[in-house]
Amino acid sequence: MAKVKITETVLRDAHQSLIATRMTTEDMLPMLADLDKVGFYSVEAWGGATYDACLRYLDEDPWERLRTIRKHMPKTKLQMLFRGQNMLGYRHYADDVVDYFVKKSVDNGIDILRIFDALNDPRNLETAVRSAKACDAHVQGAISYTTGEVFTLEYYVRYAKQLESMGVDSICIKDMASLLTPYTAFDLVRALKANIKVPIQLHSHFTSGLAAMAELKAVEAGVDILDTAISPLALGTSHPATEAIVATLKETPYDTELDLEKLNKVREHVVVLREKYIKNGLLDPSLLMVDPKALMYQIPGGMLSNLLSQLKQAGKAGLLKEVLEEVPRVRKDSGMPPLVTPTSQIVGSQAALNVILGERYKSVTKEFRSMVRGEYGQTPVAIDDDFKKKIVGDDKIITCRPADLIPDEIDRFRRELPLNLVEQEEDVLSYAQFGDTAVKFFERRRDRKYGIDSEHADHEKLVHPVA
Ligand code: CO
């Protein structure tokens, strides 16, 4: 039997889930050589929220980070998380932007693109999959896993087959909300293995306390690759601990053949970071507890920590329970979207608004309205017509692939971008996705280059926004 392979998430999802994506490149640097020596199948190192966090909070160029990691990790495959037609932003982009972003990601060092769509609408993956294949990258199609009446094994097998027919090289079950119970994991992996030829990977968050057991049952059902996090940034809203999974499978037919001594070298770097994050307040101990609420409210790890820090900053931490109870109601109203970026934010903010204003849908966010209107694609369940009418009014409902309505836009972004701030071709992609946030970063970068210190105080504030 083939051994199980491991994707280490410490450079992306582990810190995205536990410390709101605030790990800096400087924090990463000391561990990179040791990470490269372990022999992981891949290291997830980029994409997801890291790009946004670099520009918005860390005053870092995300492309420079990718090139730095690539340079220090020449042997290991680098993996990124890519939100289909949203790329790393929060709306749908035109196909020419998606094309260019995929190409630049691969050019700068990405080997594997994990591409998913929050609504599991395969039309939203088409362009990214085609572009990545054209770049000879490994394309992984990810299924956003969730629960509910319509989300049967047949539903997942059907979606996986659609992904396979698009030409993906592997398929990931993405259990962002920690909902996958061990026996369901077994059944799901077995069903996929029976129907799908490409390798199957499992990405499961630990939040509800199930993930390590789910991974073990998935292994017994024949899963090919598992996502884990090195122990100091494992568990809680992150992933099962790499060392524990490796030890579990040792000397079995599933042996990962990874060396615990080499993993311990990595651990020694990360344990220092963990202590630092606890001390500066980035690591909230409440996120480390097993939280069965995830099973009731279907809140992914990143969303939970975001809601908590958002409510805290607004002085409304006391309303967390009410907001968590409102989330499943808003989700049901809006066609049962799986909760993952950006739908987790869309449903989360609308639920928060409903609670804070004391009346449901008294005010509706622009994004929630867009989702109900079909701008993000087709929801897994059709939305009730009366509810649509209430939210969207008389505006036209969208039923085609949303990106078909978006004209090419990379040239417009290039024209808008102030030339004196551009330092590399990739800057247009930062601007396309993060607009003013990117421009402010470009200005700080320019000021730094010319030794202007005027923004320094601001930068200090940006480094530890949660603390
Ligand atoms: Co995740």
Image: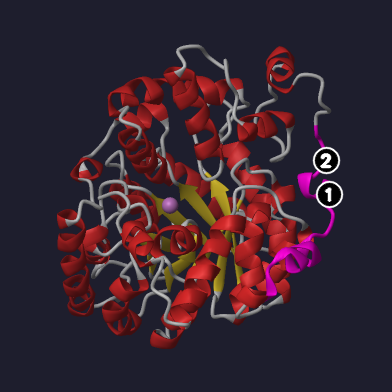
Residue 404 numbered tag:
1
159 relative to 39 in the view: left or right: right
Q: CA distance from mark 1 to mark 2?
A: 7 Å
Residue span colored magenta: 398-419
**Neighbours of disc 2 within 10 Å: few (<14), some (14-19), many (20+):** few
x and y, in percent, of residue 85 in the image: 68, 54
Q: In the figure, residue 164 lies in which quadrant? A: bottom right
Q: Mark 1 belongs to which amino acid?
A: Asp
Residue shown at the point (61%, 25%) measured from the top left: 334
Q: Which mark is residue 400?
A: 2
Residue 442 in view (yes/no): yes
Callout 2: SS:
loop
Viewer-proximal residue, 1 or 308? 308
Q: How far across and how far down the image is residue 215, in percent?
A: 35, 52
Q: Quadrant of residue 385?
A: top right
Can I make out residue 223 in this image? no
Dot 1 lies on which element?
Answer: helix
Q: Quadrant of residue 324?
A: top left
Front residue of 442/213: it is 442
The amino acid at mark 2 is Cys
Q: How many marks?
A: 2
In magenta stretch: residue 466 = no
Left or right of residue 386: residue 324? left
Quadrant of the drawing holding the N terminus: bottom left
Residue 235: image x %, image y %? 25, 51
